Image (cartoon, rainbow, N blue to C red):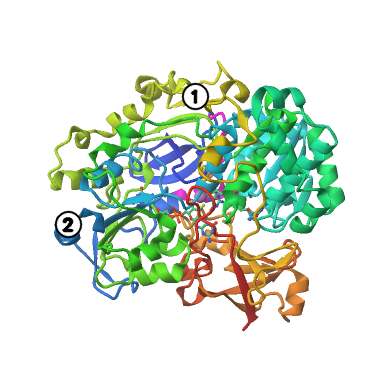
Amino acid sequence: MKSAVYRSVCPLDCPDTCGLHVTVEGGERVTQVTGDPDHPVTKGAICHKVRHFPERVHHPDRILQPLRRVGRKGEGRFEPISWDEALDEILRQFHDAIDRNGAESILPYSYYGNMGLVNNGSMDRRFFHRLGASRLERTICNTAGNQGFTYTTGIKGALDPEETVHSRYVILWGGDFVSTNMHQMTFLTEARKRGAKIIAIDVRKNRTARWADEFISVYPGTDAALALGLMHVIAEEGWHDQAFIHSYTSGWEAFRERLQEYPPDVVARITGVPEAQIRRLAREYAHSNPTFIRIGNGLQHHDNGGMTVRTIACLPALTGAWRHRGGGALKENGLFTANKDVLERPDLLPDPHVRTFNMIQLGKALLEAKPPVQVLFVYNTNPAAVAPDQARVLKGLQREDLFTVVHELFLTDTARYADLVLPATSHLENMDIYKSYWHLYVQLARPVIPPQGEAWSNYRLFRTLAERMGFTERCFADAPEDIVRQVLDNPANPYMRNLSFAELQQQEIIKLNLSADPLYPNRLSRPEGKIALYSETMAVAGMDPLPAHTPLPEGRDGTGTRDEQFPFMFLSPPNHRFLNTTMANHQFLQRLEKRPSLEIHPADAESLAIANGDRLRVYNRRGNVILYAEVTERVRPGVVVSPGLWWNQSYEGNKGVNQLTPDRTADMGGGAVFFSTSVQIERL
Ligand SMILES: Nc1nc2c(c(=O)[nH]1)N[C@H]1C(S)=C(S)[C@@H](COP(=O)(O)OP(=O)(O)OC[C@H]3O[C@@H](n4cnc5c(=O)[nH]c(N)nc54)[C@H](O)[C@@H]3O)O[C@H]1N2
Ligand SMILES: Nc1nc2c(c(=O)[nH]1)N[C@H]1C(S)=C(S)[C@@H](COP(=O)(O)OP(=O)(O)OC[C@H]3O[C@@H](n4cnc5c(=O)[nH]c(N)nc54)[C@H](O)[C@@H]3O)O[C@H]1N2
Ligand code: SF4
Ligand SMILES: [Mo]
């Protein structure tokens, strides 16, 4: 059979947004996915997960036609129906909901299972805005930390990650980048060859910490205290960069006073990091050049996550690290900004004050909202497994008077609760445009195989629904190419002026142009034009304008536990071979990840009479989950870790780790607090 190789882009919610080479046989069958050797960041290397994409695309379990529920909700029994029948039913349900309780009784629920802007963040948003549906705050991932970072730096991205090869001292703080941002590690491997020292700060000796030159173990939720302790030492010793602070920051005097509250002995007690280590780290950081801090998503999944990131982001301002190529800190890059008014058309909302739900409180939304949510429309996400307070989410999804539509490639935990399941294309079947939230390249991808079975892209689904609803605004007739053009067209953003559709069609990949102002201090865009050591914006919003450490309401740190009944802190970070719950249904990858486990320190295991491989019940007031013990010194006493996210179906009793996690919101951005969870453990 004739085979051809096409260029594509990885659509997954991963900072690397790799360029792909896709081999297709006979115009129909994807047989291989590899990294694009010419992509300046990917350089031919992609992760193990996505090399298994051919199996995902042609998986025997893929949903290839619309399905209607015939069993109980959650049971997973369906019968095939036609698209026409499915669309008729959706329209009937929409009209019934609108007649009874208004359009706000319809709730769209989506996240970034597919990062393409044609299929996520344009036609879908326009449709639900025009419909007048309830709005969704998409907070499950990064909003707390991004808000915190922005309070300090004024912009969401400050540094080109390719520059980090120049860094000489690197702190990988609260992320597992070997698994979650592999090309950052490629740049740091180069930096290390040139002499860089690499530190990892985490609650667990993860893959990244094992790779680093030094691992610093902290109690969960105490990183702001550690950063304040480091800055205390730097200021006390006079190692700060007075000239940089004077030119580029605001509030130094008040900030300095705040630092007085965090001497190393106090910080050592809170964080569990010995005082001598704090002092040495401060000295090394202040005397190295350039220094780079890569801030992970893990440390901001806490009640104090926003302030933690805001506080860490002050460190490079104290030492003036921002002056140098490869110096500074990076949470995410938001330098590419699409014009959302054009893409999403919020102006189409009949009532701009329509109610909004925070996505991390889905259980509450489904069980308590008045008027009730009558139609739930899920796409690009798997909330039955990934959303916190899972018992309540599942209870909500079970409501007999709720009509749930799920657009998916697989019968996920969420799809099993649907009244209607609609088949979705994979990204290899669509045209789309991808930006990265880490590197600075924008990429175009064209379909490389036809839609499988009767699968529809998100774009086609929402365009068709708009047509059936009789929406006549011109934006509903936009072709994917039109949307790509609109994505590129944002003259307000100076770094995007070199982007055009014609160019992108030819090049398929273009880098944002920072050449006019490569260094962040020259690009300071906040009204005062300063890095906010003291934040006037936060003061106005009624928040503490200065960095601070606030103990978690639930859990433990070096000062003790908040709840004797649930003395262990429980963390459920992503694992190496799944991407959230995507790919977690591949047997080959499942075998490598073995089974849902609980890492526990030997001392804790001994006190609970737990041996390796024991079956454990892990529980708190919200729920319980069955996990298998892995006794290891990778975690410290008092902290246990269950790498995930498996499908609920992979845990005994269909109960996943989010049975245990709270749906509280973080201190900023309405963010999720998955890791501020405390539990008790029992051997079964
Ligand atoms: N292989 C793989 N890659 C992924 C994903 C995946 O599921 N699998 N998910 C993607 C997504 S959506 C995201 S958001 C990113 C996330 O990727 P990262 O930015 O790496 O963030 P997490 O993996 O959530 O970080 C988890 C780490 O944070 C640590 N941690 C937890 N609490 C604390 C704390 O209080 N202090 C400190 N210092 N450390 C803490 C955990 O021990 C763990 O090692 O990765 C993306 N890439
Ligand atoms: N306990 C715990 N919970 C967590 C986390 C954690 O670390 N611990 N991490 C959190 C984080 S950071 C995140 S970002 C969330 C992620 O949670 P989700 O956004 O729900 O990510 P996935 O679980 O990968 O689910 C994405 C789904 O979208 C589907 N999909 C892919 N492409 C398309 C498409 O084109 N159309 C349609 N209709 N569907 C498509 C996929 O098949 C997949 O089932 O999970 C959060 N939940
Ligand atoms: S998941 Fe991340 S590392 Fe893997 S191919 Fe996609 S973008 Fe690259
Ligand atoms: Mo995420």
Part of the protein shown in magenta: 39-53
Q: Secondary structure at mark 2?
A: helix
Disc 2: which residue: 98
- Image quadrant where one finds the N terminus: top left
Disc 1 and disc 2: Cα gap in Å?
Answer: 44 Å
Farthest top residue? 516
The three-letter amino acid code for the residue at tag 1 is Leu
On the image, which quarter does residue 315 sit in? top right
Residue drawn at (28%, 29%) of the image: 482
Q: Secondary structure at mark 1?
A: loop
Q: Estimate the x, y position of residue 131 in percent, counting from the top left.
A: 21, 47
- Circle 1 residues within 10 Å: few <14, some 14–19, many ≥20: some
The three-letter amino acid code for the residue at tag 2 is Ile
On the image, which quarter does residue 256 sit in? top right
Residue drawn at (42%, 21%) of the image: 499
Tell me: 80 left or right of 38: left
| Residue 81 visible from this viewpoint | yes
On the image, which quarter does residue 203 sit in? bottom right
Which of the two residues, 506 or 560, is positioned nearer the viewer here?
Answer: 560
Q: Estimate the x, y position of residue 368 in percent, counting from the top left.
A: 34, 67
Task: Please tell me whether residue 506 is drawn above or below residue 376 in the rendered image.
Answer: above
Farthest right residue? 276
* Ligand 2 visible in quadrant: bottom left
Q: Does the beta carbon at disc 2 come under 8 Å from ligand 2?
A: no
Disc 1: which residue: 512
Residue drawn at (44%, 39%) of the image: 22
Mostly what secondary structure, the magenta segment? loop
Does 42 lie within the magenta span? Answer: yes
The first of marks 1 and 2 along the sequence is 2
